[in-house]
Amino acid sequence: MIEAQPLEQHVPTGKLKGRTALVTGGGGAIGGAIARLYAMEGANLLVCDVDPGKAADTAAAIVKAGGRATPCVTDVSKPEDCARAVKLAAETYGNIRILVNVAAAVIPDGTVVDLAFEDWNKAFAVNLSGPFLMCKHTIPEMRKAGGGSIVNIASQLGQLAVPKRSPYCSSKAGLIMLTKAMAIDHAAENIRVNSLSPGAIDTPRALWRYNGDLAAARKARGPMYLLGRPGKVEEVAYGALFLASDESSFMTASDLLIDGGYIAHKTLETKTVDGPRA
Ligand SMILES: NC(=O)c1ccc[n+]([C@@H]2O[C@H](COP(=O)([O-])OP(=O)(O)OC[C@H]3O[C@@H](n4cnc5c(N)ncnc54)[C@H](O)[C@@H]3O)[C@@H](O)[C@H]2O)c1
């Protein structure tokens, strides 16, 4: 089966040369892959993550590979952190042209009866208010730079509900709609806004449901996908590169679904095993 090449084998062509990109959740699996790929393509990276060690690790890996990156401890649910991150990127690199909102909260499974109100609020504070705040502070910088591209990492579960994930599904559906609404508001300023909805991707976030066992996760989740397997972080990162680059210059207000055919499969087959949990 064909799979995207590992990032180490990527041949850069300078698609993002000289542009500055902020990536929230940049210390995580998908955010880290996006940040690394953007840096390979010539971008200056501000790696934002609430976890200082993870932000530092991604930034260090980029610098070690010859790229430019600065870690920034950022809790995207805090307005002052988002303002500080954008200011740091502007002062360090200038020319802010790209924002990728990747950070997402981990919320326990449960129905609305089971869940605490705090769980609901946390999902929305990180998954939806976080992108709002980052966009609020980044868009004025993009105006100065003459335009930009915002990529919001949503989920297939923003389009399809699964059991006991109401805060996650609702916040991701909200993010897809926030994307469209912002795209309308900022198109005339040459700022494009798109979302990218991954299906289940093999990351630790998804694997904890299978006790970290990659083989077990693949076996359980593979049959849910038309392509017979979950996705890889590179396969999301390449989509995020397309959306950030000029190659997607006629795209705004879109949701790019990278789900291995999962949503179509679900539509065709109503009698299925338990849904994916990413
Ligand atoms: N992995 C999947 O299967 C999958 C599927 C669909 C969508 N997604 C989405 O992709 C994104 C990344 O997922 P991942 O699997 O790489 O997860 P991950 O847990 O590896 O990465 C998430 C990162 O966000 C950071 N983070 C959490 N709260 C934060 C906050 N308040 N402020 C800043 N950073 C914060 C974490 O420290 C972590 O580094 C998420 O938005 C997730 O919803 C993932």
Image (cartoon, rainbow, N blue to C red):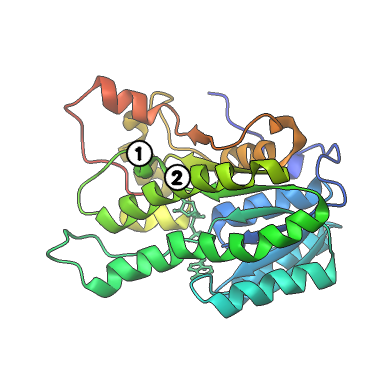
Q: Position of residue 232 (x, y in %)?
A: 53, 41
**C-alpha separation, residue under disc 1 versus residue under disc 2:** 9 Å
Crowd class of label 2 (few under 14; some 14 to 19; many from 20; radius 10 Å):
many
Q: Position of residue 257 (x, y in %)?
A: 48, 33
**Horizontal relation, residue 83 to residue 245: left or right:** left
Nearer to us: label 1 or label 2: 2
- Residue that label 1 marks: 159
The three-letter code of the residue at mark 2 reads Ile
The three-letter code of the residue at mark 1 reads Gln
Per the image, label 1 sits on a secondary structure element best described as loop
Along the viewing direction, whichever of 207 and 133 lies nearer the viewer: 133
Along the viewing direction, whichever of 125 and 115 lies nearer the viewer: 125
Vertical position of residue 263 compared to residue 151: above or below: above
Per the image, label 2 sits on a secondary structure element best described as helix
Crowd class of label 1 (few under 14; some 14 to 19; many from 20; radius 10 Å):
some
**Residue 249 marker:** none
Residue drawn at (84%, 49%) of the image: 42
Residue 27 in sight from this viewpoint: no
Q: Residue furthest top?
A: 268
- Residue that label 2 marks: 176
Residue drawn at (29%, 66%) of the image: 120
Residue drawn at (63%, 32%) of the image: 251
Circles 1, 2 touching at the beta carbon (< 8 Å):
yes
Of the numbered discs 1 and 2, the one sitting upstream in the chain is 1
Q: Position of residue 81 (x, y in %)?
A: 60, 77
**Horizontal relation, residue 128 to residue 1: left or right:** left
